[in-house]
Amino acid sequence: MFGKDEKSMVWLRFLRRMSFLRMRTLAYASFLFVFGVALIMYLAEPDTFGTYFRAVYWTMTTVVTVGYGDFFPNTDFGRFMTIFVFIFGIGIVGGLISKLVDGVQLIRNQKERGLLQVKETGHTLVFGYSRRSKHVIDELLETTDVILIDDLEREPFSHPRFHYVSGDPALDATLQRANIKKATRAIVLADHSIPPALADGRTLLIAASIERANPNIYTIVEMMLEEHLDSFEQVKVDEVLLGDETVARMAILAAYHPGVSKVVTNLLTKDGDGMFSLPAKPEWQTFRDAFHILLEDGVTILSDGKRLDLNRRLNEPIPPNTTLIVLCSEETAQRIGAV
């Protein structure tokens, strides 16, 4: 016979082994235990339970320690089975519940640390977190899922459409975790905490990694120094935004041409009309056709996506797959199919 201490050690070893069982094993064991005990109780006391479902119901309320008392065994064998359920059933089912809770907590912790694989499609990738990128993310979250890639310890904030991926943004493994092959666009903002030349080098490396992982993704990058433009064009990014030099040029324009900065600011804000992209329609043969038809809807064509001199090229035919950049209200944009 075991002594008191030996019995305690046996019980502790049993609990320790239970804690290391896989969730699938515990699920199978819980399923067999509950439905097996219910079958035994129903066969032993059919008058007490009436149906097998009621026996299952009694077993479940017993193993989760609820015990409503609407059904209870009336025989010594039934009471013995109740003791058996208390001793072993609570441990088995309790272990499963504990595993489920631990699993949920593990997934939540991995999500906060940016270690989970992204399953979303058609999402936007944003590289690097800062006050500026937070503003970009907030705007994008209104219409799309956003994946932030950075090396932060925890995700900076929580949102149903926001996901964080931790890792080196230039590594293929990190990009694959962000499901880059199913992403629609990528935005790489310059790191203003380091010298401009280094910031452009970092951005260029990330852009090259993005284009290598998904050549079809629409890539937008911020460049600090204009002399690096050739390097970015060789990487074949879709759009390059000039950082500090753009601000400097705007200051110069505002100094010599008062009011220019206000015009640009109005274009970039949500107040009043905004800029939208509109695919050219087949019935528009020339830019003049598009100008006249859209003018009736109060729409102004700004560009064909590349040049701003359309007013001097009105008689030119519109190339296939051209997307026009137009200025109009949001209601008008929805009506004419602009995005």
Image: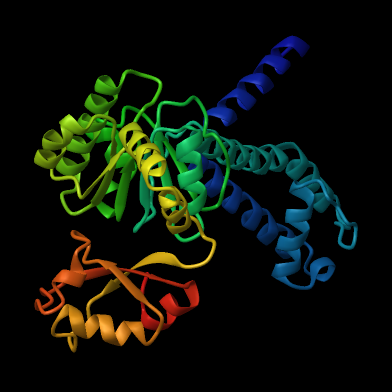
Image quarter of residue 254: top left
User: Which quadrant of the figure contains the C terminus?
Assistant: bottom left
Residue 1 in view: no
In the depicted structure, whether residue 324 falls above or below residue 136? below
Of 27 and 151, nearer the camera is 151
Residue 27 in view: yes
Looking at the image, residue 335 sits to the left or right of residue 29; the answer is left
Colour mapping: rainbow
Percent position of residue 322, x then y: 18, 71
Residue at screen point 13% across, 85% down: 285
Residue at screen point 35% across, 36% down: 189
In the depicted structure, whether residue 150 falls above or below residue 69? above
Residue at screen point 71% across, 69% down: 53
Of 320 and 311, nearer the camera is 311
Of 239 and 179, nearer the camera is 239
Residue at screen point 25% across, 28% down: 200
In the depicted structure, whether residue 249 falls above or below residue 143? above
Percent position of residue 312, x then y: 15, 70
Looking at the image, residue 226 sits to the left or right of residue 315; the answer is right
Image quarter of residue 104: top right
Percent position of residue 133, x then y: 45, 39
Looking at the image, residue 117 sits to the left or right of residue 309; the answer is right
User: Which quadrant of the figure contains the N terminus?
Assistant: top right
In the depicted structure, whether residue 115 falls above or below residue 160? above
